[in-house]
Amino acid sequence: MSGPCSYDRPRRIRRGAALTLFLAGVLATGAATGTWSDRAEGAAQRTARDRTAFGAHTPESATADRAAVERAASEAIADGKSGAQAAADVVSRSGDRWSTIYTPGEFEDFQEQLDGAYVGVGLWVRQVAGGRTEVSRVQPGGPAARAGIAVGDRLRAVDGLTTRGRPVTEIVARLRGDVPDGSWGRAAGAGTPVELDLQRGARHWTTTLHRTRLRTRNVVTDRPAGAHGPTRVKIAAFAKGTGDAVRRAVRRASPHGGLLLDLRGNTGGLVTEAVATASAFLDGGLVTTYDVRGSQRALYAERGGNTRLPLVVLVDGGTMSAAELLAGALQDRGRAVVVGSPTFGKGSVQMPSELPDGSVAELTVGHYRTPSGRTVDGAGITPDLVVEDHAEKRARTVLSGLGTGA
């Protein structure tokens, strides 16, 4: 567990911890229902408020001290207490909002998510006017689909708890089976029940679903019906295999229409997969530099990428972490035109290490920069063309003016 990790999870409120759930649909809960795919809606409007609530996160921001975390865990274990809880207390007091502590079960669950797997019911949800929550997408073949739940259905309650006015993260965590009261342990497993209170027009009903193990589609490709027109590649998150999936999409893309790379609502993922994705469009060269406890390092694209295919990258305020790294690299290298609204600004590096009781501390150790040296953390990526409304339409217009890859 020595490599950098840039895979964002919501920090659940735990005993003695001030770590807060934030950003509707951050990846761990988003993986339960696919929330990130709809977070693009209104994300730009949320970003300013989120940054105000947490403060600008700069390279000089607080980070949890690894030695202090390990010492607290060891002392707690020696006293017969929870090492993970003691470590979480130290992280909380440090003010580092990106570091976190996982129990062994939670970290195992996290690793499964990196493989694109999750336990849930196969629902995508979003908040609409009046604080209501509605279904925005249903995963084919999942428990929700088999129960007849459809897009547009209103989700009124989960296990008897109303959804009105509650953060999407909390709603999704309950769908997934995470315990939101600070208790330690892993999420509910496959086969566990969850009761949903739903409404469709005048019809109101309740149904009990049983969670199951599902797989997410982190890369979705939409190709033009004919030989002309752009190929749209939507990346929801950078899990294992994302880079290979994008390479396949690039090989099959029509050179006449170019490619629209949609990173809206992408909360990040594995940095190695973001670099592999960059390699699909670059012929080698620098993708990012980062520091780890003062030591400067760099990541490079592989040679052989398609450098002729016209490319536009679509971003918004929900574009975070590894997704910002990718957008910034393609922008700095002059490989793509970036369109949309400014990105979130999460450019810190986390690395996991095992604590004496088997729990895992994932602590901030450094920060990423784009090839030109721009700092992402607290600043984000400013698009070449800033568009708040109808961004995809504008992006397609830009793409049509870039010529062809012939």
Image: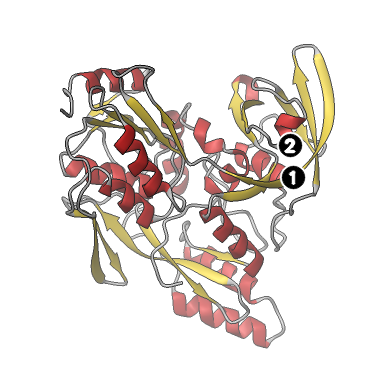
Q: Which quarter of the figure has residue 174?
A: top right
Which quadrant of the figure contains the C terminus? top left
Spot occupied by residue 132 in the image (x, y as percentages of width and height):
66, 24
Mark earlier in primary sequence (1, 2): 2
Residue that badge 1 annotates: 211
Spot occupied by residue 269 in the image (x, y as percentages of width and height):
44, 51
Query: Which residue in the rendered view is the most extreme toward the top?
Result: 202
Label 2: how many residues lie within 10 Å, few (<14), some (14-19) or many (20+)? many
* Left or right, residue 21 beside residue 233: right
Query: Which residue in the rendered view is the most extreme toward the bottom?
Result: 78
Residue located 67% across and 39% down the image? 171
Q: Do the residues bearing badges 1 and 2 touch, measured as CB atoms within 8 Å?
A: yes
Type of amino acid under label 1: Arg
In the rendered view, how is the structure colored? secondary structure
Spot occupied by residue 98 in the image (x, y as percentages of width and height):
46, 57
* Left or right, residue 376 beside residue 262: left
Q: Which quarter of the figure has residue 130?
A: top right
Residue that badge 2 annotates: 143
Q: Which quarter of the figure has residue 82?
A: bottom right
Q: Is residue 335 visible?
A: yes
Q: Secondary structure at mark 1?
A: loop
Type of amino acid under label 2: Pro
| Marker disc for residue 376 | none
Spot occupied by residue 326 in the image (x, y as percentages of width and height):
30, 46
Q: Secondary structure at mark 2?
A: helix
